[in-house]
Amino acid sequence: MATIKMTVNGRERSGEAEGRTLLVDFLRQELNLTGTHVGCDTSQCGACVVHVNGEAVKACTMFAAEAEGAEVVTVEGMANPDGSLSVIQQAFQDHHGLQCGFCTPGMIMSAAALLKDNPKPTEAEVRHYLEGNICRCTGYHNIVKAIMAASGQDVSAVAAE
Amino acid sequence: MSVTKPLPHDSGPLHVTGQARYVDDIPTPANCLHLAFGTSSIARGTVTAMDLDPVRTAPGVVAVLTADDLPFANDVSPSIHDEPLLSVGTVHYVGQPIFVVAATSHHAARRAAAKARITYAEEAPILTVDQAVAAGQYFDDGPRVWQKGDTDAALAAAPHRLRGRLEMGGQEHFYLESHASMVAPQEGGDVVVYSSTQHPTEIQHKVAEALGVPMNAVRVEARRMGGGFGGKESQGNALACACAVIAVKTGRPVKMRYDRDDDMTITGKRHDFRIDYDVGFDDTGRIKGIDFQQYTRGGWALDLTIPVADRAMLHADNAYLLDHARITSHRLRTNTQSATAYRGFGGPQGIFGIERVMDHIAHTLGLDPIAVRQVNYYHNMGPVRAGKVSGNTTPYGMEVRDFILDEMTEKLLADANYADRKAAIADWNAKNPILKRGIGFSPVKFGISFTLTHLNQAGALVHVYQDGSIHLNHGGTEMGQGLFQKVAQVAASRFGVDVSLVKITATDTGKVPNTSATAASSGSDLNGMAAKAACDTIRDRMANCLAELHQCPVERVRFEDGKVRVGDNEMTFEQAAATCYQNRVSLSATGFYKTPDLSWDRAKGQGRPFFYFSHGAALTEVVIDTLTGENRILRTDIIHDVGRSLNPALDKGQVEGAFVQGAGWLTTEELVWDDKGRLRTHAPSTYKIPACSDRPEVFNVELWDGENPEATIYRSKAVGEPPFNLGMSAFFALSDAAAACGPNYPMLDAPATAERVLQAVKRARG
C-alpha cells in the first residue's frame, strides 16, 4: 500500500492504494465519490469516464498510481461553482437524456470532453464520439439531443416531435 | 393537474450530478464483508472432489461456505424450489454457484474464489432444442397445446399452404448496473436488505426461507436500479440470500456485487425460441388455418419458464384474427443458464413467429407485406369490416374490443410516405448492384396484465404531514422507467398540488407488503391506482373536516391549483393540512387496487387473461452491403398507443429505448455457447449491444392520440414492453433488402448479424 495524492474536483485528496488499485476503485472506495460507476469492469461501457489532466479516461482502465499528482475531475465536480447545474447537466435534465441514470455520469463526462474539443459538433460527430458509452435504456435519441442542445444548437431537427 | 405533463424524471438532478445512489453506492458500513461465488466450469456432472483450502487461506478471506454450511433453505427459485443457492453435488450449467467466499474486499473475494480445485465426473450436456427433445427433457410434463377451431381441416382445405422454421436467439439484459445486494444484520436475528431488485417481496420471502425466520424479520429496501428489463425479477435472490446468511453467521454487514463477467455467466437471459409453422391461406393472404410448434430452452431450472412460454402462446396471434389455430409449446430443460424474464416475457417471441408467417405469405403471393397484415387484422373497434368470418376472439377465447391498428397503420403509412418510398427503394435497388435497401413493417397488439391473475394487485402508503408536504410510497420499483415520477404526478393531481410537494421514497417491504414484481408493464397501472386510492382516502377525510368547519357541503370542497377551496373560502394546501391536523384528522392512508374483470383458465387456455391491449406500429428502412452483410438502419417511424399518457416525455422515452433494444435483440445481439456449454459472449467486447451510432439516422416517434376504453389510471396504458416488439420492423427490412437480391424467400433467422444477412442474400439468389 502506498499513499496517493491527486487533485480531485479542485481539491487536494489523498488515500491508500495498492499498486494494482484501479482509479475507479480509488475514487469510489477511498474518496467516496460514487458518482463514477462501474458498468462492465472491462473498459467498454463508459460508465466510469472521468477527466484526467483534461482528457476523458475510462477510470477502470487506469491505475490510481498513474494519476499521482494529476488533475482529476469526476461528475461530482461538473456543477457550476454556485452549485447550479452546468449547461450539459441541465441539458440532460431538460431533454430527458437519462432513464435509469447509471450511464449518465459517464455520458456527461464524455459529452464535456467532446464539446471542449468540438464546441459545435454535428449530430453524426456526437454519435460517433459516444460509441464508447453504452446506454441500455434510452435508445440514445434524447442523449444526442441533450448534447446538441448543450452545444447551443437547434435541436428541432434532432427531435422529430 | 400534473398528470399528462411531460415532466422530467424525478431523479434527473441526482443522476447528472452523481448523487443518485445505487446499492453499491450506499456508504459501506465498517467491517463490511464482500462476497464472490465459486462456480462450475462444466455444464453437467457431479463434483467428485473439492479442495477449498487454497480459498480459505487466500488473503482477506473470512469465511467459505458450501451447501452443507447453509442453515435453512438452500433455494433461490421463484417457482418450484428447484434452484439451490449452492450446488448440492451435481452441477447443471457452466457458471452454477458451488461455494461462496466472504472476504474483506470485492477483489479479494473474487481472487480467492478462483483458487478452488474442483474435480468433476463429467456427463454429456444437453444444450440444444434437438438434444432436449430427444432426451425428453420437458418442464411442465410435456408439450402444452391450446387451440381454436379445426386447424387440420382448415389447413387441408386452404388454397395455399406453406411450412417454415424460424430460429431466434435469446438476449442478455445488460442492465448497466450489475446485480448487487447489501445486508445489515439487526438485533434478534432480523436483517435489512438493500437490493437491486424488481421484486422486493420475493427477496424478502427467499431471505426469510434462507434464514429460517418469518417474513416479518426481513425488511427489503430498493430505491432504484440501474436498469432491470426483467433481469432483476428473480435473479437477485441468490445475492440477497448469500449476503443474509453470512451477515447472520458473522454478525457483520455483507455486500455482493456481480462483476460483469459473473453477471453474464451466472444469470439467466431471454428465452431463445424455435418456431415451426404450417399455414394455409387464400389468394389475398388471409390465413385460413395455422399450426405453430414453439420450442424454447428454459435452461437448467424452471424459474419463470412456464409463464414466459404461456405468454409466447398468448401472443402467437399478435394482431391477427385466426379462425383455426393450434399452438403447441415445448418447454425444454437444458444445461444452460436458467432463462428468465426479459421485457415482453415471451410475448415478443410469439409475435415474431406470426410476423415471419405474414412476411413469408406475402413473398409467396407477391403481395405487399403490409396489405397481407391488414387483411388479417382483428376487427377494429367500431364498424366491422367485410371478409371476416368469425367473432373477434383470440385463440384463447378472449374477445378483442379495443383494436385500433387499422387507423394507426393508415396514419403511419401516410405520415412516413410509405407508397412513394417503397417505389423509390425498388428504383434504387434496380440501379445499385452491391448495396440494397429494404423496408419493413411490424404492428403489435400486446396483452396487459400478469397472466397469473393474483399478481394483479398493488398497495400504496401516503402520508400528508402538517406542513402540507406529502410522503408517497408504493409497491412498484424504479428501474429508470419513470414509474416514481408518474405515480407522484398522480398523487399531486389528487391533491391538486405541484408535484414538488410529493416526496418519492424507496420501495420498502416494511411500508407496503405483499407486492408483485414491477413487471409485465404493469407498474403505473397498478401502483398509480393504489396511490390514487390512498390519496383519495386522505382527501375525503380532509374535505369532510373542512366542510364541517366552514359549514358548507362537502361537494363544495375542491383541491386544485395548490389551493383548497371550501365553499367561498380559499386556503393553501399547507393551511388545510395544518387545520386538519389540529382537528385530529388522520392524514395517513393505505391504498389498494386489483385489476378487475380478469378470468383465466390456464389448463384449458381459455378466458380473459388481459385487462386490455396496447398497440403500436413501426416502419423501418435499412441498407445492406451484399458483399459483407453489414447494414444500417436509415429511418424508423413509429406510432404507439399509450392511451392518455400520464407523462408523454417519459412514455416517448420508453418507446424509443424499447425499439432500439428490440432491434438489438433481432440484429446485433448474439449469444454463443460452445459445444461444452460455455457462454462465449460474456462481456460487451463479444456481445454487441446497440451503440449510439446504431440507432436509426432518422427516428420519428409519435404517441397515438387516444385513451384507454378501460377505466385505468387517468385512461392511460402500459408502455414498458409493447414497443419492444417494434424492433421487428428492422428485422423485416433486412429480410426485404435480402429479398431484393434474388427470387427466393431469404428465410432470415435472428439475430440478423452481418453473417446471417449474407447467408440470406445467398439463399435469395438461390
Image: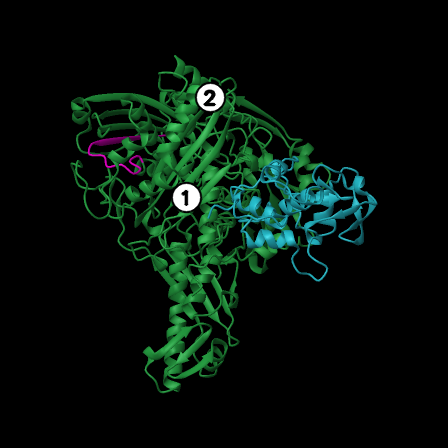
Chain colours: A cyan, B green
**Along the line of sight, the residue nearer the viewer: B434 or B387:** B434
State the residue at coordinates (46%, 17%): B433
How many neighbours does mark 2 have within 10 angstroms: few (below 14), some (14-19), or many (20 or more)? some
- In the rendered structure, are the residues bearing label 1 and label 2 in contact, judged by CB atoms less than 8 Å apart? no
Residue B320 on the magenta span? yes
Tell me which corner region of the image, top left, top right, bottom left or bottom right, holds residue B419: top left
Q: Is residue B454 left or right of residue B9?
A: left
- Residue B26 in the image, given as x and y percentages of width and height: 63, 53
**Along the line of sight, the residue nearer the viewer: B311 or B117:** B311
Q: Is residue A122 left or right of residue B663?
A: right
Query: Which stretch did the figure color magenta?
Result: B316-331
Instruction: Tell me, yes or no, if residue B305 can be seen here.
Output: no
- The N terminus of chain B - image quarter: bottom left
- Residue B218 in the image, given as x and y percentages of width and height: 51, 56
- At mark 2, the secondary structure is helix
How many neighbours does mark 1 have within 10 angstroms: few (below 14), some (14-19), or many (20 or more)? many
- Residue B273 in the image, given as x and y percentages of width and height: 39, 29
Q: Chain of mark 2?
A: B
Residue that carries the numbered disc 1 in the rendered image: B721
Residue B301 on the magenta span? no
How far is mark 1 from mark 2, CA to CA? 26 Å
Above or below residue B212? Residue B688 is: above
Residue type of the residue flagged with mark 1: Glu
Q: Chain of mark 1?
A: B
Tell me which corner region of the image, top left, top right, bottom left or bottom right, holds residue B528: bottom left
- Residue B758 in the image, given as x and y percentages of width and height: 47, 19
**Along the line of sight, the residue nearer the viewer: B343 or B75:** B343
- At mark 1, the secondary structure is loop
State the residue at coordinates (23%, 21%): B161
Residue that carries the numbered disc 2 in the rendered image: B756
